[in-house]
Image (spheres, helix red, strand yellow):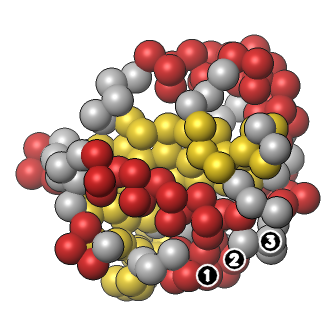
Amino acid sequence: MTCTLRKWKLSDAADLASTISNKHIQDNLRDGIPYPYTENDAVEFISSMLSANENEIFAFAITVDDKAVGSIGVFRQHNIHRQTAELGYYIAEEYWGKGLMTSAVVQICRLVFENSDIIRIYAEPFSYNIASCRVLEKAGFQFEGTLRSNAVKNGKILDMKMYSKLKSNQ
């Protein structure tokens, strides 16, 4: 099984809503995403990604056989961090543990480094999310340290881990 990245389509809304309405996925994402996640929420997200500045937000559907099974994005930072970008991703639970997310991370990093002036991509998974940390390590990211008491999620104070990949190490 292989995955490809492609631009979002409005017709992906049902698949996106189904994937992100999973509590196991929501528990590993930042707050601000509605739960349950409706098709209307998905249409709004997809529309915003399609209209975003393509030099600021690199957002794609992760697909298997052209079905959207996840989301991945690299988001440029600003000011002195303008050549740095944050990576975020998730994939439907039935696709966990199959190497698809690692493949998607490798693909998007290559795309961003080859088509922009971004020199550093970083990710901050919750420290308990061992699978996400492993994805980053397998995709060539380096562990930089633990951000202690860095987030509050579901009423708990959590540590996060900092990983990065440099264009010079691509």
Could you tell me residue 38's position as x and y percent?
81, 23
Extreme residue toward the right, this view: 94
Pinpoint residue 54: horizontal percent, then vertical percent: 35, 29
Q: Residues within 10 Å of mark 3 (few under 14, many from 20)?
A: few
What count of labels does the image hold?
3
Secondary structure at badge 1 equals helix
Residue 82 location in percent, x, y? 16, 47
Q: Is residue 132 above or below residue 47?
A: below
Label 3: which secondary element: loop
The mark found on residue 98 in the picture is 3
* Picture quarter with the N terminus: bottom right
Q: How crowded is the residue under tag 1: few (<14 C-alpha within 10 Å), some, or many (20+)?
A: few
Taking the spot 80% from the left edge, 73% from the top edge, the residue there is 97
Mark 2 highlights which residue? 131
Q: Amino acid at mark 1?
A: Arg
How packed mark 2 is, by other alpha carbons closer than 10 Å (few <14, some 14-19, many 20 or more), is: few
Q: CA distance from mark 2 to mark 1?
A: 5 Å
| Circles 2 and 1 in contact, beta carbons < 8 Å | yes
For the residue labelled by badge 2, is the local secondary structure a helix, a strand or a loop? helix
Proximity of marks 2 and 3: CB atoms separated by less than 8 Å: no
Q: CA distance from mark 3 to mark 1?
A: 12 Å
Q: Residue at x 66, y 63 (%)?
A: 101
Could you tell which of marks 2 and 3 lies nearer the N-terminus? 3
The disc labelled 3 sits on which kind of residue? Lys
What type is the residue that disc 2 sits on? Ala
Is residue 139 left or right of 83 when viewed as pictured?
right
**Can residue 127 be seen in the rendering of this structure?**
no
Q: Quadrant of residue 36?
A: top right
User: Can you identify the residue that label 1 sits on?
Assistant: 134
Q: CA distance from mark 2 to mark 3?
A: 11 Å
